[in-house]
Amino acid sequence: MKIIKNPAAESWDSIFARPQMDDSLIESRVCDIIDNVRRRGDRALRELTLRVEGIDLEEFEVSDEEIAAACSAVSDELKGALAVAKRNIELFHRAQLTEGVDVETMTGVRCRQERRAIRRVGLYVPGGSAPLVSTVLMLALPARIAGCKELIICTPPNVAPEILYAAQLCGVDKVYRLGGAIAVAAMAYGTESVAKVDKIFGPGNRYVTTAKQLVSRDVAIDMPAGPSEVMIVADTTAQARFVAADMLSQLEHGGDSQAIAVVFSDDFAGELVRTFGEQLRLLSRREIAESAADNSRVIVVDDIDKALNIINYYAPEHLILSVAEAENIVGRVESAGSIFLGNYSPESAGDYASGTNHTLPTNGWARSISGVGVDSFTKKITIQHITQEGLNLLAPAICAIADAEGLEAHKKAVTIRL
């Protein structure tokens, strides 16, 4: 990894650039997949899965018998771990259920706002070399707490038993063995076997991300989530080996992941790079993390003010503040998906079991959007009830604005009642 000392602000665009790939070919392929599924339904799902996965699917939906067999194959240790994670995630997300708004804006004019759950949601859970069992909990539990009536999961064929166990644990209604852009298209437009959903959630590779962005013209999505990223700010109270481990925990996701460390001394930077290399050599996913290390940096700055400027410029998905009095600094962070304070708050805790959600905005989207929570699975409806007295009081303002906009019928709808 490069060590860069006190970079000038005008160089930040290049230093902190996210890994870029030419997605034009991917987008063309994904467009073809979406069009095929939209036109031909189940036939397209079978043909595409055979072509992409090499699997000839007879049934898309995982049966109750398969789920029961998978649940018996999961170790008691993992079941216990998932129970702890489930408890914490539920506790944190139930606390997000706030009361509605009910205000009398003037005499006889009452305005309310009420929450309604999205009826049917589609949850994408990555499989492959790293079946993300934790993603089942992070998406299904808030959906259930929000009150969604129907939850479906799509995950690549050869579904890991752990994913099926987690789906049952969280009350998922159906699990389909469909992966990548094929799954996104099926959930977005529906087929003979897969019901169309009202909103799609979940992380994935570039095919999944591209597919979600393309179908968002017709169905809601959670966010445009890209490759994983972490920024760590570490002063002399931090331990270099902890910081290195946190960086590697993100880089093992994929070659397009990114880790940025912001430190305050050359000595710490040198120690960090050394221990990073030592830990990297021992990783089972070394090649992936090694590739992602090319995208990563160690930045040396003079003070916390410059570090905060860098944080707010970069807007990281994950931010770890391994600094003295982190609680006093966190209020100055304007943009981050999720923040971890102190030396004993690894990003892995948020990924799995502390209670916060790990589905977070990447690629600078933290400047404007939030991670997944209970609100992501709801919409807000406003309601007004106006009495005759209230309309009499409100009418002059309504009529004046209608006149200004030249909308005569708007005014008439009021004056006819007076």
Image (cartoon, grey):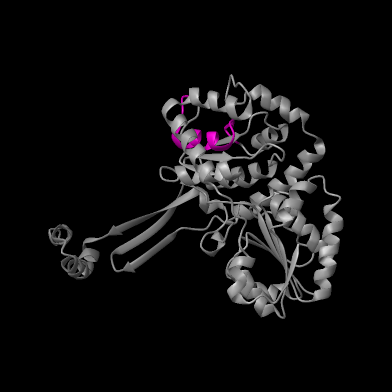
Quadrant where the image shows the C terminus? bottom left
State whether residue 415 is above or below residue 198. below
Residue 200, horizontal then vertical, whole percent = 51, 43
Residue 313, horizontal then vertical, whole percent = 58, 70
Residue 404 is left or right of residue 181, and the answer is left
* 260 vs 236, nearest the viewer: 260
State whether residue 68 is above or below residue 359. above
Residue 286, horizontal then vertical, whole percent = 80, 48
Residue 319 is at least partly visible in this image? yes
State whether residue 141 is above or below residue 345. above
Residue 403, horizontal then vertical, whole percent = 15, 67
* 335 vs 207, nearest the viewer: 207
* 172 vs 313, nearest the viewer: 313
Residue 149 is at least partly visible in this image? no
Give the residue displayed 30% in from the left and 57% down from the top.
385
Give the residue displayed 52% in from the left and 58% down from the top.
98
Extent of the magenta region: 172-192
Quadrant where the image shows the N terminus? bottom right
Q: Report the number of numbered marks.
A: 0
Residue 403 is left or right of residue 38, and the answer is left
